[in-house]
Amino acid sequence: MAGLLTTSSIMMCPHGGMVQAITTNTKVKTTDGYILRSSDTFTIVGCTFTPTIPNPCVQVQWVQPALKSQVMSDFTLTEESVGLCVAGDLAVQGSVLINYTQSQVSGL
């Protein structure tokens, strides 16, 4: 089972931008923070992707959340979830990199 992502999880875009999660989950949390869900808002700051013109990653769109665990009627996110980093024009720039997650609680 994979560790659940929380508000304390560290995530980045492939170009070094940091993912900031804003959750509306106010009911379920671990010792590290509230559990993140696929419907939460994930913005990216500090992306340096500039191939010819600046086109930084600005948000994460989750395409594969946890398959069985839910919080407040929405699927949770784990370290095995797949999120795509997208630019302002919705061009996919790569997959989100999950660098840290809590390990005390896991989900399917």
Image (spheres, grey):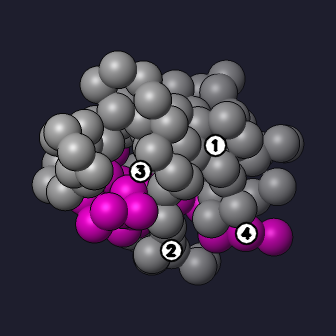
Q: Image height check: is 82 above or below 73? A: below
76 sits left or right of 1 in the view: left
Mark with earlier residue (4, 1): 4
Q: Residue furthest front?
A: 52
Q: Image height check: is 36 above or below 25? A: below
The residue identified by callout 3 is 34
Mark with earlier residue (3, 4): 4
Residue type for callout 4: Ala
Q: Which mark's residue is nearer the viewer, 3 or 4?
A: 4
Look at 51% across and 74% down and name the residue there: 102
Give SS at disc 4.
strand
Q: Image height check: is 93 above or below 98? A: above
The residue identified by callout 1 is 76
Look at 18% across and 39% down and name the residue there: 53
The label shown at residue 102 is 2
Measured Cα–Cα span from mark 3 to mark 1: 11 Å
Q: Position of residue 71 (x, y in %)?
A: 62, 36
Measured Cα–Cα span from mark 3 to mark 2: 11 Å
Q: Which residues are magenta?
A: 1-24
- CB of mark 3 within 8 Å of CB of mark 1? no
- CB of mark 4 within 8 Å of CB of mark 2? no
Q: Residues within 10 Å of mark 4 (few under 14, many from 20)?
A: some
Mark with earlier residue (4, 2): 4
Mark with earlier residue (1, 2): 1
Measured Cα–Cα span from mark 4 to mark 2: 10 Å
